[in-house]
């Protein structure tokens, strides 16, 4: 909600506008749109995720801003602060990357995969046992 209010205030003020290009790893090409130079990095990420979803691009990313970071390959490998103005960086090409998962999240995901796999294996065994072929001589 705060980002939305700030967007409206900046649009009214005017100022310089920038054409930004955001590349998503694994996607076909960059997303390009115009932003005001005083707009926050978080608002630009939000706009990029919405545009990405609206265009139906793959891979599917989701819309949670906390799962992503915006980096500039030209300015350095560090992620940009979400509360920084996009124009303060001095570049227009960015890369949107998923944050690395925490160890606990990876372990939980692995446990769920094992449970699903074990559930499938007993079902496969049951179906196989029902379809026993009795051979006659």
Image (tube, rainbow, N blue to C red):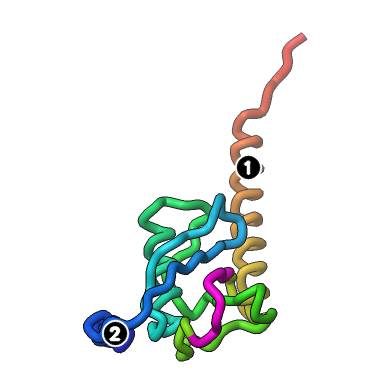
Q: Nearer the viewer, residue 99 or 89?
A: 89
Q: How many marks?
A: 2
Q: What residue is rendered at 42% in x and 75% in y?
A: 44
* Element type where label 2 sits in the image: helix
Q: Is residue 120 visible?
A: yes
- Asked whether, in this view, residue 69 is left or right of residue 83, the answer is right
Q: Between disc 2 and disc 1, whose residue precedes?
A: 2
Q: Let me know if residue 91 is in the magenta part.
A: yes
Question: Residue 3, how many percent across, how many down?
Answer: 33, 84
- Asked whether, in this view, residue 125 is left or right of residue 69, the answer is right
Q: What residue is rendered at 63% in x and 61% in y?
A: 113
Corner quadrant of residue 9: bottom left
Q: What separation in Å lies between label 2 and label 1 (alpha carbons)?
A: 59 Å
Task: Identify the residue position indicated by label 1 in the image.
Answer: 124
Q: What residue is rendered at 43% in x and 59% in y?
A: 52
Q: Nearer the viewer, residue 3 or 106?
A: 3
Magenta stretch?
88-95
Q: Is residue 122 above or below residue 35?
A: above
Q: Is residue 78 above or below residue 63?
A: below
Question: Residue 66, how many percent across, how many down?
Answer: 49, 80
Task: Identify the residue position indicated by label 2 in the image.
Answer: 10
Q: What residue is rendered at 39% in x and 61% in y?
A: 51
Q: Is residue 96 visible?
A: no
- Asked whether, in this view, residue 67 is left or right of residue 120, the answer is left
Q: Which mark is residue 97?
A: none
């Amino acid at each position: 909600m705060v980002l939305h209010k700030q967007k409206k205030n900046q649009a009214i003020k005017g100022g310089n506008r920038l054409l930004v290009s955001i590349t998503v790893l694994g996607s076909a090409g960059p997303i390009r749109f115009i932003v005001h130079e005083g707009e926050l990095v978080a608002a630009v990420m939000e706009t990029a995720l919405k545009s990405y979803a609206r265009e139906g691009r793959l891979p599917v990313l989701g819309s949670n801003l906390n799962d992503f970071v915006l980096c500039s390959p030209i300015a350095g490998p560090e992620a940009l602060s979400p509360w920084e103005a996009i124009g303060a960086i001095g570049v227009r090409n960015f890369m949107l990357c998923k944050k690395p998962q925490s160890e606990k999240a990876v372990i939980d995901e692995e446990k769920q995969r094992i449970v699903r796999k074990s559930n499938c294996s007993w079902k496969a065994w049951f179906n196989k046992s029902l379809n026993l072929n009795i051979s006659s001589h």
